């Protein structure tokens, strides 16, 4: 391996590129990575490499925004054929993997198995360099062979019986430089280098030729100009008729180049063996017939075999009996076809155990495409195979749990859909009743214009059709003095209070008659407080009108209460159950991490840490579900839009998938906004999901932040009630299908959606509108069918001081110095969920505490009544039968001084009421870290033993910013 590997990484995800680099560095591979994510950038990098900078390796994702990995492979084969090409992809089936290997890819690694990347990189680079060196040696040999073939002249010399030269051809002159006149009569020693001219050696050589008829030797020769060269000398004897030696013939051929090539080949083979012996894998090699004739030292060390025993097919003896038939069939097929060979099998260790290996082999070919050698490796994958099996078991268990929970959610959803359908039927009935009611009714928009009137209203006012009155301001039907009273008092009061009843009015009928009436009206708002319309009833019988208005208000309140109760119970129940599961998962991961603190298990610690991050994110989601179930008020604070968007980028990219790209433009001078940052994250996520759904074939989403100042003219006519001033504008724009004007008008209506049934609730944009309106901002949509959509959120600018408030909530108080000496004691743990109970018990026992378990309140009281001297009670709130609050009251009746720590998976005020706890009681929100549980318990024990009283109000500090 080189000191630093230069890698061209074709990857559209910076995070995935960084993870790959981190994995290589962790394996000890220093790498210099150039990341590109488009076809143009990839081709430019290869062109630059041809001009100077060369890459040792090309890594490529299979799926890319503007082209795929197969196209990249074809480009690399054309531009950089000697550079090894590896696929690093999140999804690649077996068929696709075999196809890309046949196309020329050196290997592939799945992103889910990133631990395999270092070995694959090392193997690819070693194989590439070994092949390059071998090609160079073969090219040298070919050139040497060609040079030898081109030499057509030989030095041919004849000698007499005394060894003197009697003839000298042109080839001799060209090879040795002597003319025939200069050479004739000289001894044979003239042809040899001085150190080879020993007369005894030459006489012995001629005597041997006379005896054996022919002799071939290789000596060092010297030419007339001093040039020295290796020559292949063939000496033969010519006999006379009697059979006696008559003369000798000598043929000399220059073999200097051949000797040099043989030395180079020996050096090349020595390098190959050195590389093979240095590799951590088991390395072997075989001739074209497929019977291995070379194994590196790692093979013999692992298998315990001896070199003399590893001949022919003897290697199959170390393969597990159950794997031999499959392995032999695959190897035979590869040898026959010349294709890439890969198999997973078990090999026997020297001690008799079997481990899983990945066997691979590639054929080496000569210039004519004939296989000259097979080069193979065996890589230990035993840990990966076992992990894969364990993962499959865990996946089956998770799929079963998901299926069970999904069935529950489907049932709950069906019930909710039934209620919605019933409500829609009731609304239709109400609309029909509205038109035909015997009481004059009308509705007004925010400017006081008539939106609708009943038949009785038309009859009462003397008009024949609605076209004569709709769109006209209600003040057009009032005398001037009533108009002034209406504008200055009644209408503002209606908007402020939301309703009035039996308000004295006078209306001017079409005939000019002025009628004294009592008007009862109310303001209708959406779920987030936005103005919809006013509904009014005009009647001259005040008693009956009051009764009907009261009944309508009661029915609307009941319907609204039932709807919110159903949604609250559904989301609250789901979040509570997931909080218990997340507590168990997070707690077990904490325990696992605490036991994986050795360097030998660093890889498992990394896996556990990644799982811990996922559990923490899931916990954040459940908290949002609980907040929705409680309809929690907004908690506005100074929110930096650029920081928030940057923090969400990874989440948004994973949400939209690879077909949709996301770009952000957040200038550093963007103002801070005064809003609830959590709700703003939800709003942005809703808008990005809607944008993604509007681009089924892929596209681009752009998120920008900007500063804006709105004047009174800018906000005039906006129903949200936003005031002129400075605003922070967050824009989410897409290149999707866009919306026609009629859809834009209804986009913010609750439950309105253009998606197919089951793919949208119709609440996404309604939630965005309500959040922004409650934040004293406004929302605007710019869209055109076929041209994309841009949604702009105008949020008030924040400019002020930061302070803190102490709302009800759970937090960990710091433990005073020296408190650790007072934390030993006995804890009574009451939890009905076995997984949560097990994690809590283990964490507290690891902290040195004695823990007694109980699964419900009754069992806990029996333990206390039986003489258990507990120093602290830790209890779940949602226990079966007697809940945690009731258990605490029963405990304090028996032992008033005993502290109680509540654990709850619900929102705080949903389970413990007012937020004021008795002295000695505290609350810990699920899911929690085991360290937080231990810190809270030891802190309460230390506080109790130190003589301090329990705190009633909870101690969580939430930052709050007041903006001018």
Image: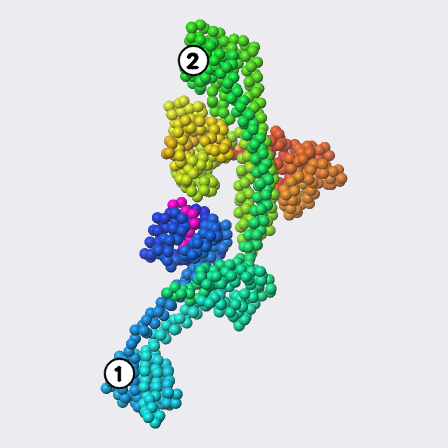
Residue pictured at 51% horizontal, 59% vertical: 343
Image quadrant holding the N terminus, namely bottom left
Q: Position of residue 61 (x, y in %)?
A: 43, 50
List x then y, in percent, for residue 364: 42, 64
On-image quarter of the C terminus: top left
Residue tagged 1: 169
Q: Residue at x 65, y 40 (%)?
A: 833
Magenta-drawn stretch contains 57: yes
Would residue 568 be visible to someone looking at this image? Answer: no
> Is 539 placed left or right of 352 in the picture?
left
Secondary structure under tag 1 reads loop
| On screen, residue 414 above or below 232 | above
In-front residue for pair 194/142: 142
Q: Position of residue 510 (x, y in %)?
A: 42, 8
**Magenta extent:** 56-66
Q: Secondary structure at mark 2?
A: loop
The mark found on residue 378 in the picture is none
| Circles 2 and 1: CB atoms closer than 8 Å | no
In the image, 825 versus 446, the foreground residue is 446
Mark 1 or mark 2, which is nearer the start of the sequence?
A: 1
Residue at (64% x, 48% y) in the render: 846
- What x and y, as percent, mark residue 794? 42, 30
Which residue lies under the disc numbered 2?
465
Most common SS among magenta residues: loop
944 relative to 339 in the view: left or right: right
């Amino acid at each position: 391996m080189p000191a630093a590997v230069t890698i061209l990484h074709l990857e559209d995800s910076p995070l995935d590129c960084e993870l790959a680099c981190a994995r290589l560095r962790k394996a000890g591979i220093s790498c210099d990575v150039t990341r590109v994510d488009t076809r143009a950038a990839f081709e430019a990098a290869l062109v630059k490499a041809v001009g100077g900078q060369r890459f040792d390796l090309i890594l490529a994702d299979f799926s890319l925004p503007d082209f795929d990995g197969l196209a990249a492979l074809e480009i690399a084969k054309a531009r950089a054929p000697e550079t090894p090409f590896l696929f690093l992809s999140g999804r690649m089936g077996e068929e696709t993997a075999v196809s890309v290997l046949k196309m020329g890819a050196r290997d592939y690694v799945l992103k889910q198995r990133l631990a395999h990347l270092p070995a694959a990189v090392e193997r690819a680079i070693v194989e590439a360099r070994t092949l390059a060196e071998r090609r160079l040696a073969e090219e040298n040999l070919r050139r040497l062979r060609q040079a030898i073939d081109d030499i057509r002249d030989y030095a041919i010399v004849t000698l007499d019986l005394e060894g003197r030269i009697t003839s000298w051809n042109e080839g001799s002159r060209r090879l040795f430089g002597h003319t025939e006149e200069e050479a004739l009569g000289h001894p044979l020693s003239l042809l040899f280098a001085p150190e080879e001219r020993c007369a005894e050696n030459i006489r012995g050589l001629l005597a041997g030729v006379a005896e054996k008829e022919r002799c071939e030797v290789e000596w060092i020769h010297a030419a007339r100009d001093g040039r020295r060269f290796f020559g292949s000398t063939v000496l033969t004897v010519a006999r006379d008729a009697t059979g006696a030696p008559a003369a000798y013939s000598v043929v000399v051929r220059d073999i200097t180049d051949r000797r040099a090539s043989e030395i180079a080949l020996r050096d090349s083979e020595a390098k190959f063996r050195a590389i093979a012996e240095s590799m951590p894998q088991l390395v072997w090699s075989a001739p074209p017939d497929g019977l291995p004739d070379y194994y590196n030292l790692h093979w013999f060390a692992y298998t315990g075999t001896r070199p003399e025993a590893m001949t022919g097919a003897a290697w199959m003896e170390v393969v597990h009996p159950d794997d031999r038939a499959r392995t032999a069939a695959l190897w035979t097929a590869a040898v026959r076809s010349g294709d890439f060979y890969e198999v997973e099998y078990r090999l026997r260790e020297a001690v008799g155990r079997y481990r899983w290996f990945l066997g691979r082999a590639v054929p080496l070919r000569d210039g004519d495409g004939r296989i000259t050698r097979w080069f193979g490796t065996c890589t230990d994958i035993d840990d990966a195979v076992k992990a894969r099996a364990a993962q499959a078991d865990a996946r089956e268990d998770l799929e079963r749990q998901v299926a069970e929970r999904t069935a529950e959610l489907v049932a709950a959803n069906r019930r909710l859909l039934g209620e919605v359908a019933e409500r829609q039927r009731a609304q239709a009935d109400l609309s029909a009743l509205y038109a035909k009611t015997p009481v004059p009714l009308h509705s007004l928009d925010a400017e006081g214009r008539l939106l609708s009137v009943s038949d009785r209203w038309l009859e009462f006012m003397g008009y024949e059709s609605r076209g004569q009155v709709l769109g006209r301001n209600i003040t057009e039907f009032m005398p001037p003095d009533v108009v002034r009273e209406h504008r200055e008092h009644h209408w503002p009061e209606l908007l402020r209070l939301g309703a009035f009843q039996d308000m004295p009015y006078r209306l001017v009928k079409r005939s000019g008659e002025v009628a004294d009436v009592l008007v009862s009206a109310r303001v209708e708002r959406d779920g987030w407080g936005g103005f919809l319309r006013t509904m009014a009833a005009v009647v001259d019988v005040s008693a009956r009108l009051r009764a009907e208005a009261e009944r309508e208000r009661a029915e609307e309140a009941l319907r609204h209460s039932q709807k919110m109760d159903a949604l609250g119970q559904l989301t609250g129940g789901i979040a509570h159950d997931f909080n218990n599961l997340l507590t168990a998962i997070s707690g077990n991961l904490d325990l696992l991490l605490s036991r994986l603190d050795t360097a030998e298990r660093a890889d498992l610690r990394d896996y556990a840490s990644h799982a811990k991050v996922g559990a923490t994110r899931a916990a954040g989601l459940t908290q949002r579900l609980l907040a929705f179930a409680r309809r929690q008020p907004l908690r506005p604070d100074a929110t930096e839009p650029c920081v928030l968007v940057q923090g969400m980028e990874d989440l948004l990219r994973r949400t939209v998938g690879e077909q949709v790209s996301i770009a952000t433009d957040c200038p550093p001078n963007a103002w801070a906004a005064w809003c609830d940052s959590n709700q703003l994250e939800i709003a942005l996520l809703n808008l990005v999901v809607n944008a993604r759904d509007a681009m089924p074939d892929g596209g681009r989403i752009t998120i920008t932040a900007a500063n804006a100042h709105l004047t009174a003219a800018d906000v005039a006519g906006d129903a949200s009630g936003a005031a002129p001033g400075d605003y922070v504008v967050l824009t989410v724009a897409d290149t999707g299908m866009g919306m026609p004007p009629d859809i834009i008008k209804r986009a913010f209506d609750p439950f309105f959606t253009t998606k197919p049934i089951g793919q949208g609730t119709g609440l996404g944009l309604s939630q965005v509108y309500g959040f922004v309106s409650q934040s004293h901002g406004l929302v605007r949509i710019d869209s055109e069918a076929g041209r994309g959509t841009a949604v702009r959120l105008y949020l008030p600018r924040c400019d002020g001081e930061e302070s803190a408030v102490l709302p009800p909530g759970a937090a960990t108080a710091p433990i005073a110095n020296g408190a650790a000496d007072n934390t030993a004691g006995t804890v009574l743990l009451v939890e009905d969920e076995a997984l949560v109970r097990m994690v809590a018990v283990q964490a507290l026992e690891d902290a040195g505490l004695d823990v007694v378990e109980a699964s419900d309140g009754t069992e806990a009281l029996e333990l206390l009544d039986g003489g258990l001297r507990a120093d602290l009670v830790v209890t779940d709130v949602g226990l079966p039968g007697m809940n945690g609050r009731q258990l605490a009251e029963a405990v304090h009746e028996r032992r008033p001084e005993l502290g109680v720590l509540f654990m709850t998976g619900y929102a705080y005020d949903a389970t413990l009421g007012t937020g004021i706890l008795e002295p000695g009681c505290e609350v810990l929100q699920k899911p929690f870290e085991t360290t937080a549980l231990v810190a809270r318990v030891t802190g309460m024990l230390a506080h109790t033993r130190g003589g301090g009283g329990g705190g009633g109000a909870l101690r969580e500090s939430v930052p709050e910013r007041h903006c001018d």
